[in-house]
Amino acid sequence: MVTAAPQIGVLALQGAVAEHERSLRSVGAQVRTVRRPAELEGLDGLVIPGGESTAMARLAAPVGLMPAIRARHEEGMALFGTCAGLILTANTVSDAEALQGYDRIGGLDVVVRRNAYGSQLDSFTTDLDVAGLAEPLPAVFIRAPIIEEVLDGVEVLAEAAGHPVAVRQGRILGASFHSELTRDARLHQLFTELAR
């Protein structure tokens, strides 16, 4: 019996949209971009890419996109937040001043700090041991958030330099890094299985 390919959206307000689309298609997902609430209809999962969390929150506000994503997640749609997407799915942002007055998605019981790994010049690539993956996963950190605290019910999938960098809670996957900037799509495979 052949199962239908999961329908995965990529939030296309800003960030590494094309790279996420490529990774998702490479693991067999049907992919479309999302800019408005109506485009969430019928999706099994949504990727919230890296970029600038404040810019994404501001661009989403006029059409009420963040509350619409939250509502669809509550109905069962899976979420995968990378870098800025992790910030937007975190329940608590310890330095949220720049996001004040803007809706975020929430749902992931972690505390994050924006840009905590440093500036663009402090970007780095490392191989991570990820729970459930047989071989190390290459990960690109660019102005990445740090997960400062993981609350009950959140599973840590990978750590770097003593901090969790990949987590899962229910139907939410979160990563501090950009897996889409490598040719290794195993984290996207994990997400499509979660979404299915």
Image (cartoon, rainbow, N blue to C red):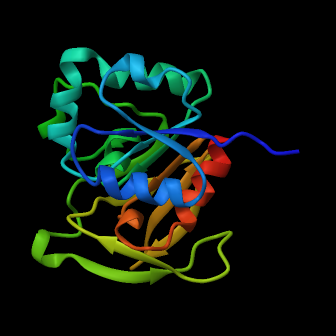
Q: Is residue 187 above or below residue 108?
A: below
Measured as percent of width and height from the top left, residue 10 is found at: 39, 41
Residue 120, image quadrant: bottom left
Q: Name the quarter where the N terminus is drawn.
A: top right
Q: Residue at x 21, y 37 (%)?
A: 56
Q: How many marks?
A: 0
Q: 70 or 44, which lies in front?
A: 44
Q: Is residue 138 left or right of residue 144?
A: right
Q: Is residue 1 left or right of residue 14?
A: right
Residue 177, image quadrant: bottom left
Q: Residue at x 38, y 31 (%)?
A: 105
Q: Residue at x 54, y 30 (%)?
A: 43
Q: Residue at x 29, y 16 (%)?
A: 64
Residue 170 seen anywhere in this rendered image of the structure: no
Residue 141 seen anywhere in this rendered image of the structure: yes
Measured as percent of width and height from the top left, residue 167 is found at: 53, 57
Q: 80 or 95, which lies in front?
A: 80
* Residue furthest right as drawn: 1
Q: 16 or 83, which lies in front?
A: 16
Q: Name the quarter where the C terminus is drawn.
A: top right
